[in-house]
Amino acid sequence: MSGLLTQRRILVTGAARGIGLATVRRFVDEGANVVALDRDEAALAMLAQSAPDAPIRVITADVTDSTSVAAAVANAAELLGGLDGVVNAAGIDLIAEFEAMTLADWSRVLAINLTGPVVVMQAAFPHLRAAGGGTIVNVSSGAGLSPLQHRTAYCASKAGLQMASKAVAMEAAAFGIRVNTVCPGAVETELFRSSIDHEPDPRAAYEAIRARYALQRIASPDEIAAAILWLTSAESSYVTGTAIAVDGGRTFH
Ligand SMILES: NC(=O)c1ccc[n+]([C@@H]2O[C@H](COP(=O)([O-])OP(=O)(O)OC[C@H]3O[C@@H](n4cnc5c(N)ncnc54)[C@H](O)[C@@H]3O)[C@@H](O)[C@H]2O)c1
């Protein structure tokens, strides 16, 4: 711990597990005050109970419900006494052959993975401006840089999130707000596990995925949180509008 986020007030979505949860824990270790937002109320309650003395508040909200997001972001800013950082980690996966993918599947993935972060950014914007600047980090995916089979909606949502982030970064710079994206490869979380478990041979599927990575392994959520930390801290003060692959070398070749 080196106090990289001392006194920073940060909202993290998708914070009940996986990459979002690792980010909350890392941020608190670095001195931040955090509001953890997720749609999973029970998992948020467990997070609050697991660290009763930590500066973590929890808010239950679904990022697809814009009214609920507006209330949640306002509540977060009130709880923290302002807002100077946002991390959008809430997201879902969808594996479906293109012809079998329904319009409802497509719409749900886009609503959570693309529209959700946009709505959160929009709600947070006035608070970040009022703070005199801040940071937004959106969790995209290597699947938004380089396509994967049977993931049309997921890839499109993640590529869209990168470009939305860049476009927002253009406007946000005038207010001292930096907007960046991280693009993880495969990360050991429930989302990753459930994508493997539906395969006929999960062990073989795991090995096939692992083999695609130059570093020949799956990431831990902490390794993604470290990149999100860097983009949220002043250590990256000259970085905006970028999409950083944190993917063990899947997409550079
Ligand atoms: N795990 C991977 O291999 C991987 C790889 C690349 C990108 N990502 C991205 O990283 C992000 C986090 O993924 P993860 O692996 O930690 O997943 P996860 O399933 O472990 O955690 C995601 C969290 O988001 C929450 N969430 C989902 N939909 C929501 C909604 N509508 N409103 C509010 N909260 C919602 C879930 O309740 C859950 O707590 C996602 O955007 C995912 O697409 C993950």
Image (cartoon, helix red, strand yellow):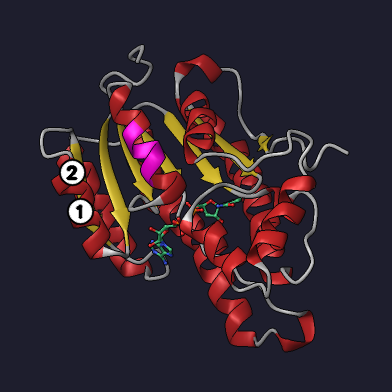
Q: Circle 1: is it few (<14), some (14-19), or many (20+) Cα within 10 Å? A: few
The secondary structure that most of the magenta stretch takes on is helix
Which residue position holds label 1?
46
Left or right of 218: which side holds 33? Answer: left
Q: Residue at x 58, y 44 (%)?
A: 168
Q: Residue 192 lies in what quarter of the image?
A: bottom right
Q: Can residue 208 be seen from the camera position used here?
A: yes
Q: Position of residue 233 (x, y in %)?
A: 45, 22
Q: Residues within 10 Å of mark 2 (few under 14, many from 20)?
A: few
The image shows a total of numbered marks equal to 2
**Which residue reaches farthest top?**
2
Say above or below: 231 vs 1.
below
Q: Is residue 13 left or right of residue 168?
A: left
Q: Position of residue 209 (x, y in %)?
A: 73, 53
Asked which secondary structure carries label 2, the reply is helix
Front-most of residues 29 and 71: 29
Q: Is residue 23 magenta?
A: yes
**Residue that badge 2 annotates:** 50
Q: State how far apart marks 1 and 2 are (Cα).
A: 6 Å
Task: Give the residue type that dot 1 points to.
Answer: Met
Above or below: residue 192 compared with residue 172: below
Mark 2 belongs to which amino acid? Ser
Dividing the image into 4 quarters, which one contains the C terminus? top right
**Tag 1's secondary structure?**
helix
Which residue is pictured at 50% across the width and 56% down the height?
Answer: 118
Q: Residue at x 37, y 52 (%)?
A: 17
Give the quarter of the figure containing the N terminus.
top left
Q: 17 or 238, which is in the foreground? A: 17
The tag on residue 122 is none
Where on the picture, by quarter, is residue 87? top left
Whether pointer 1 and pointer 2 mark residues with C-beta atoms closer than 8 Å, the reply is yes
Q: Is residue 2 magenta?
A: no
